[in-house]
Image: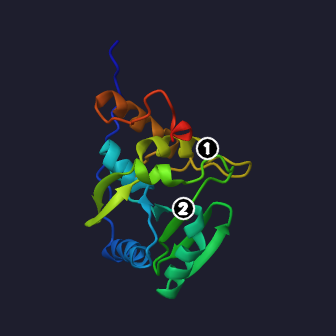
Amino acid sequence: MRVTTPNLSHSRPAPLSAEIAAFYRRAMAVLEQAGIPFLVGGAYAFAHYTGIVRHTKDFDLFILPRDFDPALDALAAAGYPVERNFPHWLGKAHGSDGSFVDLIFGSGNGLTPVDEGWFRHARRAEVLGVPVRLCPAEEMLWSKAFIMERNRFDGAGSNRSGYNSAAAIMPIAVSVTSGVPLGWSANPPVCRS
């Protein structure tokens, strides 16, 4: 069976401003200095796995639930306004230009808590010139699938280039056929030990 993929190329994304890139780098440095492990997810991990680069208004950092309050406290101490938007899964640190860092430790519906397995299966990469660990593609797939809530769906947005994030998980799934090993074997992430 031949698998074909749609042409997912888009116009070249606008470059990330130096101010936003510095904010994202500084947020990672603050967490690192505070001893809080994190995984880069969202658009930056997506770019690593698929080659589709897009800059968004946020930078997703996945952390363990026990690190949520210490992470917000560290970022607040570094001078960033923070909020506990959804204290059961998400908080934010705000940059001065409207950008923000999402601190994610689960999903709104409670089905995808970040656990040690995410860190064991993380991939090493470089993001914005910083060596980091990325959310495993498997966790990106199933956390995106479970991001829906009664009043919120994170899959319908699109950015200026016309990229529709509802299709965000498809290129990752297709990449499995082109050599990106997901490491599930017969068990999805929730079943891993």
What residue would you read off at disc 2? 64
State whether residue 36 is above or below residue 96. above
104 on left or right of 32: right
The kind of residue on which mark 1 rests is: Phe
Tell me which residue sits at (49%, 41%) in the image: 141
Instruction: Find the distance from the CA under tag 1 to the CA under tag 2.
Output: 18 Å
Mark 2 Cα within 10 Å, few/some/many (few <14, many 20+)? Answer: many
Q: Position of residue 30 (x, y in %)?
A: 42, 78
Tag nearer the camera, 1 or 2? 2
Relative to 149, does residue 104 appear above or below in the rendering? Answer: below
Secondary structure found at label 1: loop
Percent x, y for residue 127? 30, 61
Q: Label 1: which residue?
A: 146
- Counting residues from the start of the chain, the first of labels 1 and 2 encountered is 2
Residue 104 falls left or right of residue 86? left
Report the front residue among 126 and 70: 70
